[in-house]
């Protein structure tokens, strides 16, 4: 076949295909357009309904101050986060998709300014009594007070002509079922050898001067235990155990011992017999491997505890003329200390990191990304992306807790002493 005849054949077939396609498209275009419009409108409705529901929530900001001479480990804060999970109340289909209801979220924040660190909790007002009771049960000498939103003292938009900042969101580097380093690893038997993971960030805050500020935000939303199935599947894979497939129409008939698929395809397949290896042969290598045993133990420990979807966000703010990266390095070092090579670690989310490597409109795009991060911090918004980090109560208590007694290198705003009741033998003066 010559090239001309091949080209003529190809163009003829292509024209016939286009003619057939356009003929079919003339009948179905309105169906495609209708379905596409429904999908787009449905997505807009979900965003609108959830935003409307979120804006109806009444918020309260609590500041927590603890005495200097109170010795409490992060285990106490773990109980506080466990109490926060009581707000978990899955919405029904109608409530979720038509009323926009979601699980309530809370924001645990550390704000550093002028050498002082402040611990805040932003939460729905209906859960104020719950969280105050949880904190007082673990820190009886703490002082909890409702305060004005500190963000009201800041400009609506940053960066602007006077202020600039650097920051972003951090996510887990590995799948959620792998844990980060938690406080039991940092603790020793003796009090003098106990390491407080908050010491690094609080020391950095104590050195802030002028308009320098460090903001840390941990937004949590309670979730059920469904996500733990991924961890169980990972454990089975490490053990060499096949995960059970979801049952369908081809599943086993009750009491028969074969599937519908096997019944249909049996006449066309050669009979075979599967040779099963003893469990001792398949699992010997795994049981003798200490590193795999440790990994499995850590995964099981993480998925066994109540957990939260978590957004980790930080901002380092200063005037444009004085801004430098020293405070950014301190916060990055604080988050990096929880990572390991074999399990999990925090890493910056490139989708929110305010660095633009493309030369096209670099300054404008960098400024836009920063403003989006600042707005999400101010409005206490979860990360808009689907893949969200999941931390359990032990991990949250590690990254956010009130400093233990040994942390005394910062000008942390604390109560100078405990409050106590008056002695029983104090004389009473009659006003009469």
Image (spheres, helix red, strand yellow):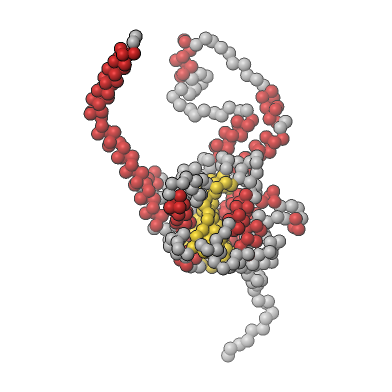
**Residue 318 sits above or below residue 86 on the image:** below
Indicate the quadrant containing the C terminus: top left, top right, bottom left or bottom right: bottom right
Q: Residue at x 63, y 60 (%)?
A: 204
- Residue 308 visible in rendering: no
Compared to residue 320, the image places residue 351 above or below, namely above
| Residue 329 found in image quarter | bottom right
Q: Which residue is found at the position 53% from the left and 40% from the top?
A: 227
Quarter of the figure with residue 138? bottom right
Counting from the top left corner in percent of width and height, residue 134 is at: 57, 59
Residue at 67% x, 81% y is 426
Q: Is residue 301 left or right of residue 59?
A: right
Instruction: Give the residue displayed 43% in from the left and 46% down from the top.
Output: 360
Residue 239 location (% of width, % of height): 64, 30
Pick the front one: 292 or 266: 292
Camera sees residue 46: yes
Work out whether 120 lies above or below 284.
below
- In this view, the residue in front, 256 or 373, is 373
Closest to the observer, 21 or 196: 21
Residue 65 picture location, percent across and down: 60, 66
Q: Is residue 276 above or below residue 181?
A: above
Name the image quarter holding the N terminus.
top left
Q: How many marks?
A: 0
The front one of 221 and 13 is 13
Q: Is residue 403 left or right of residue 10?
A: right
């Amino acid at each position: 076949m010559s090239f001309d005849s091949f080209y003529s054949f190809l163009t003829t077939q292509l024209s016939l295909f286009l003619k057939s396609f356009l003929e079919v498209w003339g009948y179905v275009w309105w169906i495609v357009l209708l379905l596409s419009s429904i999908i787009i409108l449905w997505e807009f409705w979900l965003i609108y309904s959830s935003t409307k529901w979120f804006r109806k929530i009444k918020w309260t900001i609590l500041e927590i101050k603890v005495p200097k001479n109170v010795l409490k480990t992060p285990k106490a804060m773990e109980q506080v986060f466990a109490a926060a999970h009581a707000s978990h109340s899955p919405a029904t289909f109608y409530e979720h998709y038509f009323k926009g209801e979601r699980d309530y979220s809370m924001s645990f924040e550390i704000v550093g300014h002028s050498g002082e660190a402040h611990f805040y909790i932003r939460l729905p007002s209906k859960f104020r009594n719950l969280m105050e009771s949880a904190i007082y049960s673990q820190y009886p000498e703490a002082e909890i007070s409702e305060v004005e939103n500190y963000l009201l003292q800041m400009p609506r938009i940053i960066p602007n002509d006077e202020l600039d900042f650097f920051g972003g969101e951090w996510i887990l580097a590995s799948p959620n079922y792998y844990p980060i380093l938690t406080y039991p690893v940092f603790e020793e038997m003796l009090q003098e050898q106990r390491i407080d993971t908050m010491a690094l960030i609080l020391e950095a805050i104590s050195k802030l001067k002028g308009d320098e500020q460090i903001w840390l935000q941990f937004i949590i939303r309670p979730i059920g235990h469904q996500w733990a199935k991924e961890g169980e599947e990972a454990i089975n894979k490490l053990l060499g155990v096949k995960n059970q497939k979801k049952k369908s129409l081809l599943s086993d008939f009750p009491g028969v011992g074969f599937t519908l698929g096997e019944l249909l395809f049996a006449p066309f397949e050669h009979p075979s017999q599967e040779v099963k290896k003893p469990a001792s042969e398949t699992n010997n290598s795994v049981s003798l491997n200490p590193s795999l045993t440790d990994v499995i133990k850590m995964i099981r420990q993480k998925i066994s505890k109540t957990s939260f979807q978590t957004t980790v966000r930080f901002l380092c703010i200063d005037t444009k003329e004085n801004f430098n990266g020293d405070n950014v390095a301190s916060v990055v070092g604080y988050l990096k200390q929880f990572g390991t090579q074999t399990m999990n670690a925090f890493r910056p989310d490139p989708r929110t990191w305010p660095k633009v490597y493309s030369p096209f409109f670099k300054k404008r795009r960098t400024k836009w990304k920063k403003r989006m991060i600042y707005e999400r911090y101010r409005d206490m918004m979860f990360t808009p992306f689907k893949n969200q980090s999941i931390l359990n109560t032990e991990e949250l208590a590690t990254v956010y807790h009130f400093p233990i007694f040994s942390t005394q290198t910062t000008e942390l705003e604390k109560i100078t002493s405990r409050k106590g009741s008056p002695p029983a033998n104090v004389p009473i003066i009659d006003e009469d």
